[in-house]
Amino acid sequence: MVNRAKKAAAAVCLGAVVLTSVPAVAMAATAEPVTQQTESGIAPYMLYIVDARCTLSISGTTATVNAWVIGDDFDATKAKVIAELQEKDGNSWTSIATWTDTQNGNYASVDKTKSITRGKTYRVKATVTVWEGSASETQTIYSS
């Protein structure tokens, strides 16, 4: 009789563990992934920004910069992108060109070209902001 009571108690405890872990797994699966990491390597969860990207492509001595941000379709009231083309100078980065786009709504983008020097190292730093009314969220992302 005691063994049967111990087995029943163990089954109840095991069932409680399984039932309490299911919501945590379900919550983890619903978090939206962030598409790019910050310079520190930490990828934050974004509240107002649905997606943001920046890319750099180089052909000969022409760099093409593309950066954009998307806010929530229903709640975003304004979106802004500041894209900086940066050149590596020793161990630091120097901005050689900056472009900005601000739009009412949920989308802003920059698509520009710039002449560069062959053999140097470049990247794009994009600072993106989305507003929902008076509240806003800003993220800084970098090209690969």
Image (cartoon, rainbow, N blue to C red):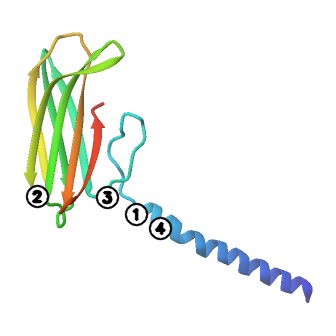
Q: Quadrant of the rendered structure where residue 17 is? A: bottom right
- Circle 1/circle 4 CB separation < 8 Å: yes
Q: From mark 1 to mark 3, how far is it between C-alphas? A: 13 Å
- Per the image, the residue denoted by label 1 is 30
Location of residue 144 in the rendering, given as x and y in whole percent from the top left corner: 30, 30
- Per the image, the residue denoted by label 4 is 26
- Per the image, the residue denoted by label 2 is 105
* SS label for mark 3: loop
Q: From mark 1 to mark 2, how far is it between C-alphas? A: 25 Å
Location of residue 132 in the rendering, given as x and y in whole percent from the top left corner: 20, 61
Q: From mark 4 to mark 2, how far is it between C-alphas? A: 32 Å
Q: What residue type is disc 3 on?
A: Leu
Q: Which of marks 4 and 2 is nearer the N terminus?
A: 4
* SS label for mark 1: helix
Question: Is 141 left or right of 116, judged from the image as shown?
Answer: right
Quadrant (top left, top right, bottom left, bottom right) of the N terminus: bottom right
Q: Does 22 appear above or below 139? A: below
Q: Which of marks 1 and 3 is nearer the N terminus?
A: 1
Q: Quadrant of the rendered structure where residue 43 is? A: top left
Q: From mark 3 to mark 4, how far is it between C-alphas? A: 19 Å
Q: Does 28 appear above or below 11? A: above
Location of residue 135 in the rendering, given as x and y in whole percent from the top left corner: 24, 59
Q: Which of marks 3 and 4 is nearer the N terminus?
A: 4
Q: Residues within 10 Å of mark 2 (few under 14, many from 20)?
A: many
Q: From mark 3 to mark 2, how far is it between C-alphas? A: 16 Å
Q: Earlier in the sequence, mark 3 or mark 2?
A: 3
Circle 4 or circle 2, nearest the eye? 2
Question: Is 98 left or right of 125, judged from the image as shown?
Answer: left
Circle 3 or circle 4, nearest the eye? 3
Q: What residue type is disc 2 on?
A: Gly
